[in-house]
């Protein structure tokens, strides 16, 4: 790991200072692919509810890099050997784990591309960068893909207690001002260990793990799935869907070239070429915002209205409840809207729709949180923390929403 | 409520500034009974583990006063009528709720007096103060005793979600540095309401309530019942018990007059006279510390050794587990200690002992947390938050400890 | 002041919660003119240095509103009468004081419009809003323009110690992570008073005022005038200037309609019509970002190169020093660049230029900070704080910079 | 430096976690001499004004240890060689630098002992500990005494920008809640360097240094020399003086054996024996508090009254101004008091007295702050920061106070 001649420090309100650990990491940060993340907000439309939540993917990736440095230090202090090559690979993997995010983060996965996760696009970016940097990212990519022999490395990058989550929960709590969602990332990391190539938490950390899970649950329902954020994100998905529809039907609509590329073409994982990646690498939140602004003068009622509603924060109403909404209710509301505004049923479906929200606080099956007991045995956290009954957190919790225009429903 | 000519502001690292709302409150704070709380640490021996935890009962009482002012403001904004007299009575009740605490807070309840809670002593102080202030505390005392017709007032002072807890959890988390125990007191208060004379939380606050309960649980097991704090507190109780034993058996031991009073006399709730209260009002942490220091040169092995161990933080070892320790184990350890140090069995019992720790995160039966649903109905929080299964938190959780000298057990 | 039926609380990481004080204020916040501020970052290009500094004008305006509520409370407690109408007018004035900011805040004042300050545009917005709200903003506008009889109101909105500064210094320090720039806004406000219709600070606040001035000075040189931020802003001004140049010379360039309007027309204060305001009200940071991205493929070397440099954070080098740079130095550098890249001298001047930075920590003449002594007299802060010699802070401090391409100069 | 088998982490609200770097440091912390610091508040009587300021010398010493670890890391990154032995010696020196503080910190230096600074007593403790630890503290003691060849080490322990100050300013600001006194210790340390065996700050840190000096100045006048704290400290000095006077005159007075030792004997630097040190090592705040409490029933009017005033926070009044008080004023006040309370003039002088407060923000002559310019030259900070005119801060600022009973003066 070639160190920097001069230590670079980046100010961070969350951790104080973040230091850049090596020359290669510094170059990756300076790369225009990574700089693009400056223009993608971490929390999508959530700043419509929490005005402080305008921090970017760029900042989050640096924060996760900071925590990974701490994790490496902690594990080495516990005599887990980590070579300089492995260390740098961990930094590469965590730095680039989110580089495939598109505008407004998750919204794009359901609108601009078809069934392609941001992780898949992150991997595409990594591969291109690996060519550019003469194969220096290979080990980092292996860790990211969980193809490296030491699996706990991957768990540090992507797992129930990865530094990704440890950063974003803390950072999102910080920027939204929802202080009760704060977790103690430093303490959780201080209690990490490795046993049989699995990332484990020392037993005395059980209450911190509980707290982490509950804080995460709170952040989901109170922040990430806040009803205003949900309706805004759904409207954003729909306005892009409408734009695509219009484009496909031969209408002229305004948009940057990059955005139009994704509206005109149906990009699947198979058709996602290097050319696609290049266009994607030029796309960020500003393309969406600019388009929304121009669309407010478009003649299509749906496109124009949804754009205005989003820009002027005059959103649809939303109801959330534990049981699904009756299909008849949705249909009857739509037909009322159709007649009052002379819309087709298809058009009305842009303003009246239902869906579900899902959150699983703890996924025991796929990726358990393992506690290391004093006797050296490893158990699932739910077995130790029997009184809190974390088991119940391992079932998905589902809520249902229905959106509709104001003065209706 | 006679306001102050000049607003008094007290600096507080937790809330910024605390303002003193009235002339009477200001006089109560200046009273020597209340000033005594400056010399009683909030968290007993916990600062042996968390060196920052040296904040006082004085500071906590002011913090609770601050939160009560917020609560009054919030409830009035929701059209709950609170008269100026009731307002001041709330401030009196919360300001004085802990005035009966003795040295090192809870330790004293089990050693200096017999079966008298600090609340009972608080009430004695309030009554004396009420005479001194010409009956101006009467309404506050009624609220404290839950004898006032509007019962939600008492719930603000002493209940599952009272401002006492809302302050001490936040403050203790702050001063210990256990940041994940932080609760968002301001948000919880913002969601308070009153329905049918019961304090309720608006339904959307359910996740904050969950977080509050889990943070409280974490603070209990990680901080309040931290094993080092537990063993220190148990040793403090025992060194005082030994001192009393020696005094009762005619030995001379050092101590301030106030302390000796409580060592010589067996104070019960019946024998707790005005004279007792006067002596009590002169007692604080420093009496204990000074005595411990002098006792390090006492000839009694037990008194001397326990005092040294506490002062020099060279504590007994402690084991904590979910099952009780076998009585035989304790007995056999004691007999080994007896022979190695030529102690009587009774003397050995000061160094080897077992006990249990108990924490009930949520006491549903005695004092439920009520949620106000949008339809106006009121339900217990466990009914809304069904997925977290708070019900399990309503059972007591018990752990067992055993203490013994180092190099043993 | 018509209060809201239901108190609206907005989460803020800086102050906890911001409450919206009245129906009218709520409507102004919801207005699309004000919502636009969500898309304008408070600190221009500064986030290229401090990645956390992505907070918006929207958020700052709400923060200033919060502090104004505190100030009103403090002054009323000191028996300064403020009527409900005056109170709401203060909120209006502070909420809207920055509504005239354009993309990237100050950069626009030197490029998109000619010699029009954002305050002048704020006033234009206020006048249009006043018509829309049937004259309800009249008093607020008077205060903003300092045409209201009670002049200390204007000083709260725009003065050496206005709540605007008290918020932005605190907020910018918070988001950049430059914690030593933090000021104690709450304490400063707590010490405000009014004497002879002038806003004054009580004498004991002299050290807080000193600290405020020094923190402000630090924020200027360390943050606002950070060399990387300075060069980025200068490049932004220049890329827009180039774009205008190309447009005026008949070249086609990409841009949103709003942006092109300001590039095609020379807008002065006289020609700034209602139509101009309408176009302006659609303009925000995203127009600039989108344009920069498209311009990276433009054939004009200057436009393309500056755009790439800004987007990929591959900026010009900058030197800052206390003395001006020699004109010959600039000229000779330019001629070298001309020959090596075959640029005209005019084109080279986009990459090599010099200028000056100026900061006056304390402007005594135009707007002194007045201290209220205990004897009731009022003096300038420099007279009390004689030892710190604040007088020296009242002179402008000037530095000089020169920018040039890397590997040069 | 023998590392610990298991990293010990101590929770700290200021820095998060403090880690104990070696076995020897751990043993020093566990030593009863060091544990005594748990019972000595850092800020003397200041908590009578700022109730949060009850943190201890123990905590401050750990905080300074934390910062020293950062400083070592920073300097090593800048290629300053520091051997493991030197590293541990630095930790020893900073950990023990304040171990000689007596009860209520500085108050004792003017009452219990005669003209002995706490540094001299610290050194005595270090020497005794050095014997106990077989000479392992020798290098640390050399650094403390500035007898080690590399002088910048001593500057890290005791100088204008030592980690002692960097911790206490930050910590005192934190615990008092005077947030504007906060300094950015981490950034200041990040900018340290060594040039010609002198500790220097890199030039770009000039604003941070300014801020540090101004924050320190603010903390002095607003906190350390707050008038209520000053009067309380002066009263404490006087009550101890009175106690000594009574003891010397053959009166019986209550006190712990350790306290009486210092009241009965006139301890000078020459007569400060190992026996004295042993007694001193048993003395802490609680001895003073206990004595004050018993003295409230003493027959001597002066002793009794001063003790009550301190305990019940019913202090003398104090006036502070820039000019000395006229001696006649003091005399005439005293004679009035003599007649109204039948006191001798000597007794009256315990209640009416004057004195001066002095603060020198920056001591350029004895210990300048050196800036390292980019060209490698080193200059005094006042030469770079010419505009702020730090020179004026290098002159002592003096204020005068006069104390007298209430309803007088």
Image (cartoon, coloured by chain):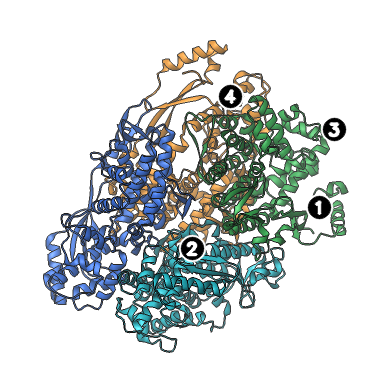
Chain colours: A cyan, B green, C blue, D orange
D224 lies left or right of B333: left
Discs 1, 3: same chain: yes
**Do the numbered discs 1 and 4 sit on residues whose CB atoms are within 8 Å?**
no
- Write the residue at 59% across / 20% down: D302
Chain letter for mark 1? B
Residue D325 x %, y %: 40, 21
Please state which of residues B386 and C405 is positioned toward the viewer in this rendering.
B386
**Do the numbered discs 2 and 4 sit on residues whose CB atoms are within 8 Å?**
no
Chain letter for mark 3? B
Q: Which residue in the structure is indicated by mark 2?
A: A172
Q: Which residue in the structure is indicated by mark 4?
A: D306
Quadrant containing the N terminus of chain D in the rendered view: bottom right
Q: Which residue in the structure is indicated by mark 3?
A: B250
**Do the numbered discs 2 and 1 sit on residues whose CB atoms are within 8 Å?**
no
**Do the numbered discs 3 and 4 sit on residues whose CB atoms are within 8 Å?**
no
Please state which of residues B201 and C73 is positioned toward the viewer in this rendering.
B201
Q: Which residue in the structure is indicated by mark 1?
A: B352
**Do the numbered discs 1 and 3 sit on residues whose CB atoms are within 8 Å?**
no
Local SS, label 2:
helix
**Foreground: disc 2 or disc 4:** 2
Taking the image as drawn, is residue B51 in sight?
no
Local SS, label 4:
helix
Above or below residue D201? Residue A388 is below
Local SS, label 3:
loop
Above or below residue A297? Residue C1 is above
Q: CA distance from mark 3 to mark 4?
A: 35 Å
């Amino acid at each position: 790991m070639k160190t920097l001649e001069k230590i670079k420090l980046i100010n961070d309100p969350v951790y104080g200072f973040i230091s850049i650990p090596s020359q290669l990491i510094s170059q990756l940060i300076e790369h225009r692919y990574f700089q693009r993340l400056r223009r993608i907000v971490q929390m999508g439309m959530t700043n419509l509810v929490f005005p402080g939540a305008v921090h970017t993917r760029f900042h989050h990736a640096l924060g996760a890099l900071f925590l990974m440095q701490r994790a490496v230090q902690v594990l080495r202090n516990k005599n887990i050997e980590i070579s300089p090559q492995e260390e740098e690979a961990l930094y590469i993997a965590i730095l680039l784990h989110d580089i495939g995010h598109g505008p407004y983060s998750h919204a794009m996965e359901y609108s601009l591309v078809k069934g392609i996760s941001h992780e898949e696009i992150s991997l595409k970016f990594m591969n291109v960068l690996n060519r550019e940097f003469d194969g220096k990212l290979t080990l980092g990519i292996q860790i990211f893909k969980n193809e490296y022999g030491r699996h706990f490395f991957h768990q540090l990058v992507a797992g129930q207690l990865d530094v990704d989550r440890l950063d974003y929960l803390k950072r999102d709590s910080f920027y939204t001002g929802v202080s009760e969602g704060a977790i103690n990332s430093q303490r959780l990391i201080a209690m990490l260990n490795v046993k049989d190539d699995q990332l484990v938490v020392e037993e005395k950390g059980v209450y911190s793990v509980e707290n982490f899970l509950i804080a995460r649950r709170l952040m989901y329902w109170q922040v990430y799935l806040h009803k205003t954020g949900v309706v805004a994100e759904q409207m954003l998905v729909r306005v892009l869907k409408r734009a695509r529809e219009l484009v496909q039907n031969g209408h002229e609509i305004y948009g940057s070239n990059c955005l139009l590329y994704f509206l005109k073409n149906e990009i699947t994982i198979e058709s996602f070429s290097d050319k696609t990646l290049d266009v994607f690498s030029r796309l960020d939140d500003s393309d969406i915002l600019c388009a929304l602004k121009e669309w407010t003068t478009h003649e299509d009622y749906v496109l124009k209205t949804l754009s205005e509603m989003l820009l002027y924060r005059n959103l649809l109403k939303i109801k959330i409840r534990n049981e699904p909404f009756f299909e008849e209710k949705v249909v009857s509301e739509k037909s009322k809207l159709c007649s009052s505004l002379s819309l087709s049923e298809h058009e009305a479906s842009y303003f009246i729709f239902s869906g579900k929200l899902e959150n699983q606080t703890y996924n025991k099956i796929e990726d358990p949180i393992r506690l290391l007991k004093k006797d050296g045995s490893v158990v699932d956290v739910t077995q130790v923390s029997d009184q809190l009954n974390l088991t119940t957190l391992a079932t998905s919790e589902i809520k249902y929403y229905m959106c509709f225009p104001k003065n209706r429903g």
